[in-house]
């Protein structure tokens, strides 16, 4: 009997089964051989929300939630955020290694020269009502890109696939900025190929009458750091959606639109918006004790604290807190910062929160920074989607090239009625 295996005794039959253990997991298909009769379907695992089920083997992102560790391709997030641009990290996530100087130059050029969108896409944008949510516009327009690039369906042609990767990373920033301009009634500001990726995004967002927009280097760098921190985060809801939709072999634009739709939810990409609304509701530092009291009574949750994966301080939150100080030196300190700092201090010292491991997460400070930089609350999930595009595409490509992956098709435990005969209308009893 192998020591690297699990022995299961089925108490219903008294039979024993040896299940191999690989990388700390068992294959749930191995449970199927555990049966009470030959015509039995076999045992399944039941795991709502996939809380303890690995759906894939991946080389992209490593997280140790108990220790507060996040790494892209083995590199600690702290080092990447401190030394790289977003596009450099996007290259790493997609290619597995940090680029050489020549590779980065070529990568940046390709992304930069794909930022322009087909003029007819503006007609799609113009079709939305003036107060349409930017994320709704973003999702719909990204999906519409599949009709402009029908060659994207050739997903197993490597050269073609790379062309779609350039297009997606470049154009999501343009679509996001155009969605914002449409909402506030400003003319679209076209990409400027002389600027960096984040500098160009600020240009497309905020350029007005100046002939040449010059982004503030502190804000440009802050946006780079925020984009790096949001580039990938393992098998979260939206990434799982990207892989699930992509497993049908649909084009990447359609799959990414589905991933963005998953991100739209308040439990995922809308979390930093919820933090900002909470801080605004508290308003002043003196109102914090009463708010904390109501949280403990179960009236509502403390937004921006705790994480599905991290049971320690979110490593991204530490980095963002440092970025906040740099941003506020340029923009001036937001009045909500004092509320956030005091709320964090109390939560980290209060036994109620410490016992439950409710530490600040990435959403706690990111919303305050975005607000200080001039981004409206409605843009927050869109700002999340721009950098996460590189992670989504990397996960999608890894799934496509994994010979073990098939079209996603989870099982269910059926608890409904057994077979029964049809009842004519006149014989039916009201429920």
Image: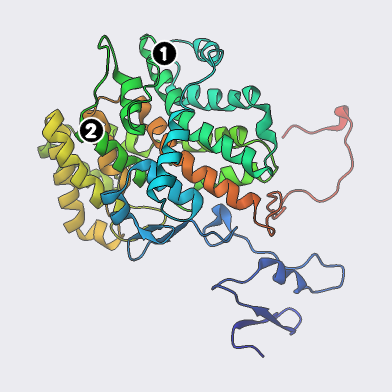
The residue lying toward the viewer, choosing from 397 and 131, is 397
Q: CA distance from mark 2 to mark 1?
A: 23 Å
Please identify the quadrant where the C terminus is shown. Answer: top right
Please tell me in which quadrant of the rendered image residue 6 appears: bottom right
Q: Position of residue 403 (x, y in %)?
A: 69, 58
| 41 displayed left or right of 390 | right
Residue 317 lies, with reference to residue 220, above or below; the image says below
Kindly tell me whether residue 303 is visible in this rendering. Answer: no
Depth check: give the residue in front, 309 or 223. Answer: 223
Quick check: 62 left or right of 43? Answer: left
Residue 225 pos. (x, y %): 29, 43
Label for residue 182? 1
Disc 1 crowd, CA 10 A, few/some/many (<14, 14-19, 20+): many
**Tag nearer the camera, 2 or 1:** 2
* Residues under numbered marks 2 and 1 in contact, where contact means CB atoms less than 8 Å apart: no
Q: Considering only order in the chain, which callout, 1 or 2, is on the residue closer to the N terminus?
A: 1
Measured as percent of width and height from the top left, residue 401 is found at: 65, 53
Q: Residue at x 69, y 44 (%)?
A: 156
Residue at image coords 69%, 34%: 153
Residue 406 x, y percent position in the rendering: 71, 53
Element assignment for label 1: helix
Q: Secondary structure at mark 2?
A: helix
Checking the image for residue 219, the label placed there is 2
| Residue at the image position 47 percent from the left and 42 percent from the top | 390
Question: Is residue 309 at all visible to an observer of this figure?
Answer: yes
Q: Residue at x 55, y 14 (%)?
A: 124
Q: Quadrant of the N terminus?
A: bottom right
Residue at the front extreme, as displayed: 102
Mark 2 surroundings: few (<14), some (14-19) or many (≥20) residues within 10 A: many
Q: Is residue 396 above or below residue 17?
A: above
């Amino acid at each position: 009997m192998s020591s690297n295996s699990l022995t299961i005794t089925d108490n219903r039959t008294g039979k024993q089964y040896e299940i191999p253990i690989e990388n700390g997991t068992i294959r749930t298909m191995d449970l199927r051989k555990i049966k009470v009769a030959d015509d039995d379907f076999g045992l399944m695992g039941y795991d709502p929300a996939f809380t303890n089920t690995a759906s894939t083997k991946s080389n992209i992102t490593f997280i140790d939630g108990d220790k507060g560790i996040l790494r892209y391709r083995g590199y600690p997030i702290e080092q990447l955020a401190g030394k790289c641009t977003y596009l450099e990290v996007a290259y790493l996530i997609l290619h597995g290694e940090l680029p050489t100087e020549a590779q980065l130059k070529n990568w940046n050029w390709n992304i930069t020269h794909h930022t322009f969108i087909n003029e007819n896409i503006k007609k799609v944008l113009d079709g939305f009502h003036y107060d349409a949510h930017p994320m709704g516009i973003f999702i719909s327009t990204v999906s519409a890109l599949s009709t402009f690039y029908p060659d994207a369906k050739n997903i197993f042609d490597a050269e073609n696939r790379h062309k779609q990767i350039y297009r997606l990373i470049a154009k999501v920033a343009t679509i996001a900025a155009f969605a914002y301009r449409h909402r506030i009634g400003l003319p679209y500001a076209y990409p400027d190929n002389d600027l960096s990726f984040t500098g160009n995004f600020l240009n497309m967002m905020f350029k007005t009458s100046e002939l040449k927009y010059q982004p503030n280097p502190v804000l440009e760098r802050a946006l780079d750091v925020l984009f790096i921190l949001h580039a990938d985060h393992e098998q979260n809801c939206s990434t799982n959606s990207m892989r699930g939709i992509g497993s049908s072999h649909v084009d990447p634009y359609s799959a990414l639109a589905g991933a963005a739709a998953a991100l739209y939810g308040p439990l995922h990409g809308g979390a930093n918006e919820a933090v900002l609304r909470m801080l605004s509701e508290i308003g002043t530092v003196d109102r914090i004790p009463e708010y904390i009291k109501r949280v403990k009574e179960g009236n509502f949750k403390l937004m921006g604290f705790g994480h599905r994966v991290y049971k320690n301080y979110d490593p991204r939150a530490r980095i963002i807190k440092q970025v906040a100080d740099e941003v506020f030196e340029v923009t001036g300190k937001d009045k909500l910062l004092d509320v956030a700092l005091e709320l964090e201090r109390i939560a980290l010292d209060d036994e109620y929160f410490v016992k439950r491991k409710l530490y600040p997460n990435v959403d706690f400070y990111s919303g305050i920074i975005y607000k200080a930089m001039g981004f409206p609350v409605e843009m927050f999930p869109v700002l999340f989607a721009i950098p996460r595009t590189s992670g989504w595409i990397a996960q999608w490509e890894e799934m496509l090239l994994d010979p073990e992956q098939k079209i996603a098709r989870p099982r269910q435990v059926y608890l409904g009625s057994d077979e029964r005969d049809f009842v004519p209308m006149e014989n039916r009893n009201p429920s």
